[in-house]
Amino acid sequence: MNKYLSSSERDEMLKLGAVESLFMKMEENYSQVKNVDKEMMKYIRTAKTFADKALRIRMKYMDIDEIVKLVEQTRKHRIVVRPRDKVIMEQKEVDKMQEVTVLKTDDFLDFVSWIINFSCVHCTNEGKEVEECGLKRLLIMNDVEVINADADRYCPYSYMEEQAVPKGEKSEKVMKVLASEVKCNEIIQSEPDKGIQGRPA
């Protein structure tokens, strides 16, 4: 399994974490009910345990920064019951919000600084160097999509493991990264002293 989660798989893992939290709360609530059915409680606990085991098995394959991010995001999610029409309206609002990522100015400028001073696409760091890389951690925590999701030896933002990618596809990815750098510079110049809204990738 990949060390890094795609956006779709991250959604699935967050759902699984929310389900585990749901069964934990159910267990807590029903444990205070008199004459609760013991078999029902057994299955509630079993469901909670299975969800937890599935999450832990997936995390065994993940990069440590991805694990930290997933755990933090899971704590912020829960399952809520809503009428279907309200859910549709709320989802539309969420979709609009996802078009813009709001970052603290200091974090955003740190990100830009790393991009300017280091060329990730040509990075040759390996193993422990990749695990300890501050830039890689910053990119992941700010939802910057990795270039190579199944990277193992080198950084997921490097092309060192992308040698098999056809030249045309690789060039397109490079142009996307370079375009994001230009966009970052434009934003800094236009709004240097206040909160910045933008998605650099």
Image (spheres, rainbow, N blue to C red):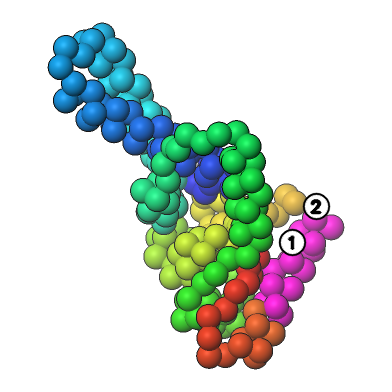
Front position among marks 2 and 1: 1
Q: Residues within 10 Å of mark 2 (few under 14, many from 20)?
A: few
Q: Can residue 57 be seen in the rendering of this structure?
A: no
Q: Earlier in the sequence, mark 2 or mark 1?
A: 2
Q: Main secondary structure of the magenta part?
A: helix
Residue occupying image coordinates x 58% and y 66% = 101
Q: Which residue is mark 1?
A: 173
Q: How much space separates mark 2 and mark 1, taking CA atoms? A: 11 Å
The spot of residue 121 in percent (x, y) is: 64, 67
Q: Is residue 175 left or right of residue 157?
A: right
Q: Is residue 15 left or right of residue 48?
A: right
Residue occupying image coordinates x 21% and y 10% = 38
The spot of residue 159 in percent (x, y) is: 65, 60
Residue occupying image coordinates x 70% and y 78% = 183
Front residue (pair 117, 105): 105
Rendered image quadrant of residue 61: top left
Rendered image quadrant of residue 41: top left
- The numbered mark at residue 166 is 2
The spot of residue 64 in percent (x, y) is: 39, 53
Q: Can residue 76 be seen in the rendering of this structure?
A: yes
The spot of residue 11 in percent (x, y) is: 54, 42
Front residue (pair 113, 9): 9
Q: Which residues are magenta?
A: 166-183
Amino acid carrying label 1: it is Lys
Is the C-beta separation of discs 2 and 1 under 8 Å? Answer: no
